[in-house]
């Protein structure tokens, strides 16, 4: 069968590539065409457009790139129309994907399956109307989502979390020894403070300089930056000097051998927890005090990090909005580094969160449901 997938950012590329491999196992004749990234391309099929040309976040960047976004949408619609897949599989990225879903469902009458739900439980709950109209099946990766959607009279399938799959696969098949990792990357023989500053240029610009200033206050640790896919190394060098290592395509080995981390929100917070690395979640947003007010009064969730959302309580500190400052991040990192009891409690909460997520197999379960439903 023919599968058309759309992933608009780095994490979507990762999870879509794992889903594609699982689909190949369930359907050896699978043919893929997609908007995505290098990881999806390695699985096979035709890459129509790279997510680097699509990843715009925030009101101003979207407005400035509106012509590009509209052109990408038109290219996507026409490509799907010509390809005539058996199913269109959307991965997160709601602003773009829900518009494509409407076209695919109402004009082309092709089944639409959604893998990794947009976070409408946090805000924009009105989008449930689009899901009811244009999405045939939604595959959830967060254990609290089925109950939320059930309250809105929309049934979904919880398949497990693909980050559990990715980390488990790495630990079983690709794990790198400490000495090899340090030697390969010419690292000093001292503990690592991992810096995960986001996957978009604006996130790196806003978060990395503060992270580096905080790191300088802990000279017993060496800061190591996890380079985001699609970001040129020279972009990072605007904010740091050659003494700080930037590792590309090595985020998992870096987390495996890190002692502590500063992490922006998103999938990275969950992956850091799965590797049991104590972390500070820190995320800059403009007009911090206003952002905090909006979050408290207009969002429907008490947390922004996946770790806290899944655990249902505050496991890691979330320093964003008016709480984002060099002083606050330094204080929290100091608690993790110097307070053994505080650190161990965070690790215990990680273990509880991992139990809630369940066992690996999200990609396989989602693929089996997709292929099974198409066959029937």
Image: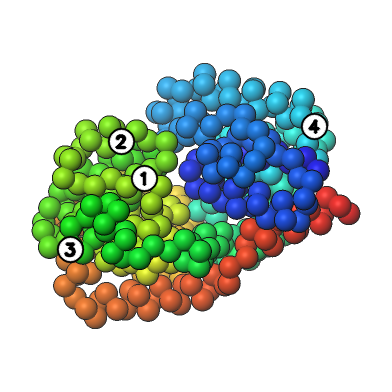
Residue in front for this viewpoint, 376 or 26:
26
Image marks 3 and 4: residues in contact by CB distance under 8 Å: no
Q: In which quarter of the image is the N terminus?
A: top right
- Mark 3–mark 1 Cα distance, whole angstroms, equals 20 Å
Q: Is mark 3 on a helix, strand or loop?
A: loop
Image marks 2 and 1: residues in contact by CB distance under 8 Å: yes
Q: Which residue lies furthest to the right in this view?
A: 376
Residue that label 2 marks: 233
Q: Which of marks 2 and 1 is nearer the N terminus?
A: 2
Residue in front for this viewpoint, 125 or 189:
189
10 Å neighbourhood of mark 3: few (<14), some, or many (≥20)? few
Q: Earlier in the sequence, mark 2 or mark 3?
A: 3
Horizontal placement of 278 versus 126: left or right? left
Image marks 3 and 1: residues in contact by CB distance under 8 Å: no
Residue that label 1 marks: 248
Q: What element carries label 2?
A: helix
- Residue 325 versus residue 364 in the image, above or below: above
Residue 218 place in picture, x, y as percent: 13, 60
Q: Tell me the mark number nearer the camera, choosing from 2 and 4.
A: 2
The image's mark for residue 84 is 4
- Mark 2–mark 3 Cα distance, whole angstroms, equals 24 Å
């Amino acid at each position: 069968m023919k599968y058309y997938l759309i992933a608009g950012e780095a994490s979507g590329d990762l999870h879509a590539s794992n889903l594609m491999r699982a689909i190949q196992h369930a359907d050896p004749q699978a043919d893929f065409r997609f908007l995505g990234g290098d990881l999806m391309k390695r699985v096979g099929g035709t890459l129509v457009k790279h997510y680097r040309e699509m990843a715009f976040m925030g009101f101003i960047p979207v407005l400035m790139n509106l012509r590009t976004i509209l052109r990408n949408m038109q290219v996507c619609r026409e490509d799907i129309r010509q390809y005539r897949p058996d199913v269109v599989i959307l991965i997160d990225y709601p602003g773009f994907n829900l518009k494509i879903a409407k076209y695919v469902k109402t004009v082309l009458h092709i089944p639409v399956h959604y893998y990794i739900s947009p976070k409408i439980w946090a805000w924009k709950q009105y989008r449930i109307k689009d899901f009811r109209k244009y999405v045939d099946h939604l595959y959830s990766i967060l254990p609290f989502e089925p109950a939320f959607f059930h309250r809105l009279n929309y049934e979904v399938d919880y398949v497990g979390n693909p980050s559990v799959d990715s980390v488990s696969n790495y630990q079983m098949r690709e794990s790198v020894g400490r000495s090899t990792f340090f030697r390969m990357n010419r690292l000093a023989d001292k503990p690592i403070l991992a810096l995960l500053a986001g996957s978009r240029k604006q996130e790196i610009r806003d978060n990395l300089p503060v992270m580096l200033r905080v790191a300088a206050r802990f000279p017993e640790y060496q800061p190591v930056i996890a380079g985001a896919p699609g970001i040129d190394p020279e972009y990072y060098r605007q904010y740091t000097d050659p003494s700080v290592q930037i590792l590309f395509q090595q985020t998992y080995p870096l987390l495996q051998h890190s002692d502590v981390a500063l992490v922006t929100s998103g999938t990275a917070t969950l992956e850091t927890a799965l590797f049991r690395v104590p972390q500070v979640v820190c995320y800059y947003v403009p007009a911090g005090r206003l952002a905090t007010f909006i979050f408290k009064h207009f969002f429907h969730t008490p947390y922004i990090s996946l770790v806290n959302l899944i655990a249902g309580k505050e496991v890691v500190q979330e320093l964003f909005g008016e709480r984002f400052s060099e002083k606050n991040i330094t204080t929290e990192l100091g608690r993790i580094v110097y307070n053994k009891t505080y650190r161990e409690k965070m690790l215990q909460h990680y273990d509880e969160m991992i139990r809630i997520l369940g066992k690996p197999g999200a990609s396989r379960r989602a693929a089996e449901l997709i292929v099974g439903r198409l066959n029937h």
